[in-house]
Amino acid sequence: MIVTAWLVAAALVLAALAAAAATRLTALERPVRLAVTPLVVLVAVLVVADLGLVLRAHPADRPDSMLTHLGYAVASVGLVPMLLQRRPPAEAAEPEPAALWVVALALLAVAVCVVRLVQTR
């Protein structure tokens, strides 16, 4: 589980670097935006598996602060979808997509949350 979390965090960092590069290379913008969804699903699967392991663990093996652990879990899963499902302003017909720098920062934040999720166990 720990190795998987580190691999997911590495994939998130690589996607963040690709998003940062896509600000200069417009040909990368669409692939980067398409790669975000599978990464979010992968993080969600990782978080569900982690929570399952935590709930099945002996009480002595559970995290010291369950609230902190759950906070990292919720932040890991909820940050990027919250960013991508923005509401349009009243006068606009469709929302403008989030800037790639914002996507890159959100992916880095999720990578940090995934690492902290593993470290709090």
Image (cartoon, rainbow, N blue to C red):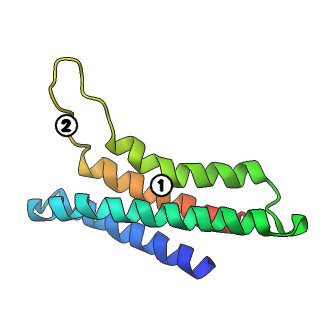
Q: Position of residue 68 (x, y in %)?
A: 71, 51
Q: Which residue is mark 2?
A: 96
Q: Residue furthest top?
A: 91
Q: How many angstroms separate mark 2 from mark 1 (CA)?
A: 22 Å
In percent of the image, x 40 and y 47: which residue is there?
Answer: 81
Q: Residue furthest right?
A: 60
Q: Nearer the viewer, mark 2 or mark 1?
A: 2
What numbered label is drawn on residue 109?
Answer: 1
Indicate the amino acid at tag 1. Answer: Ala
In percent of the image, x 32 and y 52: which residue is there?
Answer: 103
In percent of the image, x 43 and y 59: which residue is there?
Answer: 108
What numbered label is drawn on residue 90?
Answer: none
**Secondary structure found at label 1:** helix
The answer to whether 118 appears left or right of 98 in the picture is: right
Q: Position of residue 62 (x, y in %)?
A: 81, 64
Asked if labels 1 and 2 touch by Cβ distance under 8 angstroms, the answer is no
Q: Position of residue 18 (x, y in %)?
A: 26, 66
Indicate the amino acid at tag 2. Answer: Glu
Classed neighbour count for the residue bearing mark 2: other residues with Cα under 10 Å, few (<14), some (14–19), many (≥20): few
When the figure is inspected, residue 28 is found, relative to residue 72, above or below; the finding is below
